Amino acid sequence: MPSEYGSVQSSESSPLTHDGFHVENGESVIHQHHELHRHLSLFDLTCLGVGATIGSGVFVLTGLIAHSQAGPACFLSWAIAGAAACLSGLCYAELGGRFPQAGSSYVYARETMGECASVIAGACLFLEYVGSASAVARSWGDKVVEFARSFDSEEKAGNFLWECFLFVLDPGFGINPCAFLISLASVLLLMGGVKESKVVANTFTTFNVCLVLFMSGMSLSLMKRENMTPLFPSEFGAGGVIRGATSSFFGYIGFDEICCMSGEAINPSKNMPRAIILTLAIVSSLYVTAAFGLTSMVPYN
């Protein structure tokens, strides 16, 4: 049927798609496909993956795993968890190259197993991001409260404005307004567009990586061999390394966020797999090095 959009040949026996049209039962329905602007290069995707993965894992989990699960061998726990994450990452890299569309696990499940599986995958993906983002936001909010309380003193005790300020930061009942504010700021930043938000993401990721490298370098320069013996303490044994690996895997959550940005990536069929592999290689190296440096500098107990 001729129109201002062109001509479409219809068929009553089978649906036909052509340049945004969907023809079914002899009637044409126009579907407008709006593609996102592609701004994200390989460097941007890698920064996004590294920034989404590196966080409280290296700063908090390392000490907890070394103290209560694996001892000085906690760097082996990070290596084992990293190997498992790499196996998962290779699957994401393969699917990301075959289906370079925004949606991550939802798209992969829809294309391979159908819509029912994709709904379940989408729900799990949503819960994963809500849980991990909430944990990071709450951790950031708690650190702000601790930082503010470090300025508390006897001179400020009884000061009405100071007490009100502390109450706003920490009203109790498990409520943390700072966590809400950082989440809101992140949402507003993302609503401004990926072209603008990627500059902030790249800046913070670069700073974060430099901080981890500085921490690792300084801890290695201060290492003491006696802190690494015995490598497998008797109270934990070699099995503690495996238990530590199960805990440290949480630190690798986030690299799959790269797959959600396929719709805004430049040359996604090639850059998506490369970004995932680069992210896991960088993150695994940083985690293992930092864990080894910290446990060699400070006794695990």
Image: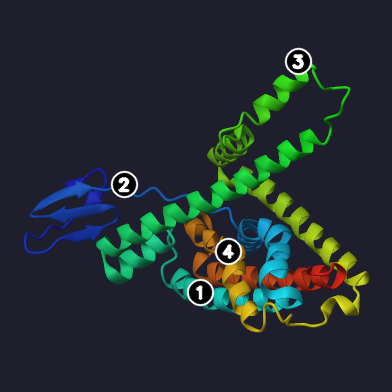
- Residue contact at pointers 1 and 3, CB within 8 angstroms: no
- Precedes in sequence: disc 3 or disc 2: 2
Determine which of the numbered discs, if any, sits on residue 160 in the image: 3
Residue type indicated by callout 1: Ser
**In the image, which is nearer the foreground, mark 1 or mark 3?**
3
Q: Nearer the viewer, residue 197 or 24?
A: 197
Residue type indicated by callout 4: Phe
- Residue 1 in view of the camera: no
Determine which of the numbered discs, if any, sits on residue 126 in the image: none
Under circle 2, the secondary element is loop
Determine which of the numbered discs, if any, sits on residue 32 in the image: 2
- Precedes in sequence: disc 1 or disc 3: 1
Expressed as whole percent of the image width and height from the top left, the position of residue 260 reads 48, 57
- Precedes in sequence: disc 4 or disc 1: 1
Expressed as whole percent of the image width and height from the top left, the position of residue 250 reads 58, 64
For label 4, the residue is: 250
Under circle 4, the secondary element is helix
- Residue 204 in view of the camera: yes
Determine which of the numbered discs, if any, sits on residue 88 in the image: 1
Give the left or right position of residue 84, taking residue 286 as reference.
Answer: left
Q: CA distance from mark 1 to mark 3?
A: 53 Å
Q: CA distance from mark 4 to mark 1?
A: 13 Å
Expressed as whole percent of the image width and height from the top left, the position of residue 83 reads 60, 79
Residue 29 vertical position relative to residue 220 in the rendered view, above or below: above
Q: CA distance from mark 2 to mark 1?
A: 35 Å
Q: Mark 4, residues whose alpha carbon is within 10 Å: few (<14), some, or many (≥20)? A: some
Q: Nearer the viewer, residue 196 or 58?
A: 58
- Residue under the point 67% across and 56% down: 56
